[in-house]
Amino acid sequence: MKIGIIGCGKIAVKAHLPSFMAIPEAEVVSVADIDEEKAKYVAKKFGVRKYFKDYNYVINDKEIDLVDICTTPETHAKIAINAASNGKHILVEKPIASNVREAVEMIKVAKRNGVRLCVVHNFRYFSAMQGVKRSILEGRIGNVTSIQGVCHQHFPLRWSPRTWWFNQGGVIYDIGIHMIDAILWLAEDYPKEVYAVGGDYLNGMNCVNQASVLIEFSGKKVALCDFSWLTGRTIFSIWVHGTAGHIFSDMCFNHFYEAHGVPTPIDEIKNFSLKMFTFFKDLISGRFFLSSLAYHKPLIEKFIESIKSKEREPVTGEEALLALAVAEAIVQSINEKDKIDIMKMIQSKSGDKNLCV
Amino acid sequence: MASKVGVSLSDYTHIGDMLEKALNSYGFNLKGKRKVIIKVNLSEFRTPETGVITHPLFLDALLKYLRKFYDLDSIYVVESDSVVGLPDFFIRWFGFIPILQKWGAEYINLSKCGSVLRDIEGLHLKKIRVPEVFLDDAYFISLSKLKTSSITRMSCALKNQFGCIPIRWKSKYHPWINEVIADANLVFRPDFSIVDGIIGVGGVQGPSFGVPINARIFVYGEDPVAVDSVCAKIIGFNPSEIAYIKKSEKLGVGTTKYELVGESIKKIRRKFEFNRIEHLLLKIGFHLQQAYSRRYSRDSL
């Protein structure tokens, strides 16, 4: 499969390109970036044949099957719609778009042109997250009643000197969207209503840097999550409570464990041993140091497989749309100090009153 | 000859009175200068109560003192951009603007104010960019924080002048950080240094992600080398094991010999939780992470 990558920023260099390079059936044939020097540098570094300043050359290239969009969120929709119209499959970095309206349009155009659309919500591929999902699906904790997530990350100046992210919903659209996607994925349910408190807890940062959020699902379950850019340590932990037990997971150490019945010292010893085993395994393989960057590859690999086998994408456009809708609802709820009905919001923002996700 | 260094106890609630008392008893004097430059620390996106950046209440107390005792034409509060520091934003987000307005002080971003290239006889640098504000005949106060550092072990008065170098990618100097700190102090030698340790930073992940230490002290003096020597003692280091203190002394920035006024060293020594084994392991881990990350992404940047 021939790949064209648009956007040569850090996420492309640190995650997407290394992932494609490690997948035998994928070949990156061109890269594009508005900074031509950067595109040239990246092409040379990764042995890519062609580089462009204008992304339209990638989209119009007949050789290319799949376009990978690694640009900033406000450009996703325009590029994806152009690519889909040219018959290219689309892989797009999270969030799917900068707003619900654009995301709905992207999904519609992809469907109309018979191309596949997948969004990089790679946190699903942490082995701990996969383990949590497996336990839930196997019914090991009964019916899920509530999910608690803590998603803290230091303001990501170390990641990129650019500051585009704080015009776009702050922490919610940055690392927060991964937490929202993980919760929706684990809940296996439609988010009905969202209520959030928080906002800009500094002076004039003008974006959400702290939020506590309640998500009520259509079924009998609820999620409570805390998002922050203000604390100094990365925390990405999810607790899932069910009628037959609990699952505690921590993506920083790629660790999860189930808890049933009375807490005992044996439980603690077992959990500690498991945590150390995973830690040393990840340390030796280097995954510990790469953290979430190590999980782009399995998602991309699965997407390529799904295109070939015509199976469902690992993360569909609709799933990513729901995550984005929850993110948008969080910001709206903070501003309006009221709960937001997700489906009504999607219908009103997309201008399609009959739309059903 | 020993340099005089003062140490006082305070919290942020009483810092106005305590700072006034401390500076007056030290004999603080602007020596007829009518302009003052205050170099603060806004080097990282951390809120003031973490101890990482200048506390607005300390700056408020210093500006109040200067306005009360001196008839000044201008007060400039300065900081420069760094890879992880956007002072233009931090000055607003962390609540400094009302304080600057209250005392008629002007904020200047050293990376954006224009600069001249100057030759120096430094240990590493032979040329250095000097921001234009430093070309004026002004009294320079270095208002720094009392912190441990994973790179230089501690970060106090002398390290603050590293932030006077106006280029953004200062991290390129990290392999020669001790020499460059000494070189920066050759050019930007403060007339007076104040180290705010009311809330300092301890642990091995300083200066940005360490443990806030409620040390309730501040250290001050005209000689930044002597001030840092006292800070080293407070944290639990021997000044001779801090490379940039030794190198600064060698360059003639100041002396490690100090005469303490105010509190005694015994009374002010604090536990800054700097475990040397943990520090070593952290350094090994950091290098491993860099190596893995570079190998994975083929990114040599």
Image: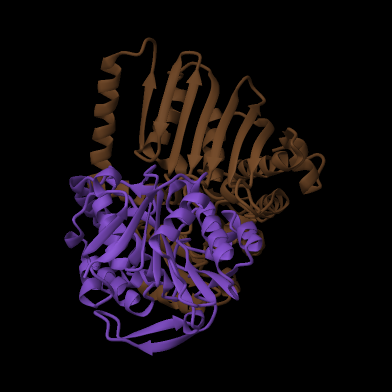
> How many numbered marks, from 0 up?
0
Chain shaded purple:
B
Residue pictured at 38% horizontal, 18% vertical? A259
Question: Which residue is at the front of the view, A92 or B211?
Answer: B211
- The single residue placed furthest to the top in the displayed view is A262
Residue pictured at 46% horizontal, 54% vertical? B21
Looking at the image, can residue A69 be seen? no
Q: Quadrant of residue B162?
A: bottom left
Display colour for chain A: brown
Q: How is the image coloured?
A: by chain
Q: Is residue A315 above or below residue A223?
A: below
Residue pictured at 42% horizontal, 88% vertical? B117
Please state the horizontal and vertical placement of residue A338, each as a whole percent of the image. Answer: 75, 34
Question: Which residue is at the front of the view, B259 or A2?
Answer: B259
Q: Is residue A95 above or below residue B295?
A: above
Residue B168 is left or right of residue A86, and the answer is left
Please state the horizontal and vertical placement of residue B207, each as a whole percent of the image. Answer: 36, 54
Q: Is residue B186 above or below residue A219?
A: below
Please state the horizontal and vertical placement of residue B113, each as a whole percent of the image. Answer: 54, 79
Please state the horizontal and vertical placement of residue A92, each as a whole percent of the image. Answer: 55, 55
Residue pictured at 55% horizontal, 28% vertical? A187
Question: Which residue is at the front of the view, B106 or B278?
Answer: B106
Q: Quadrant of the N terminus of chain B?
A: bottom left
Question: Which residue is at the front of the view, B131 or A114?
Answer: B131
Looking at the image, can residue B232 be seen? yes
Residue B151 is left or right of residue A90, and the answer is left
Q: Quadrant of the C terminus of chain B?
A: bottom left
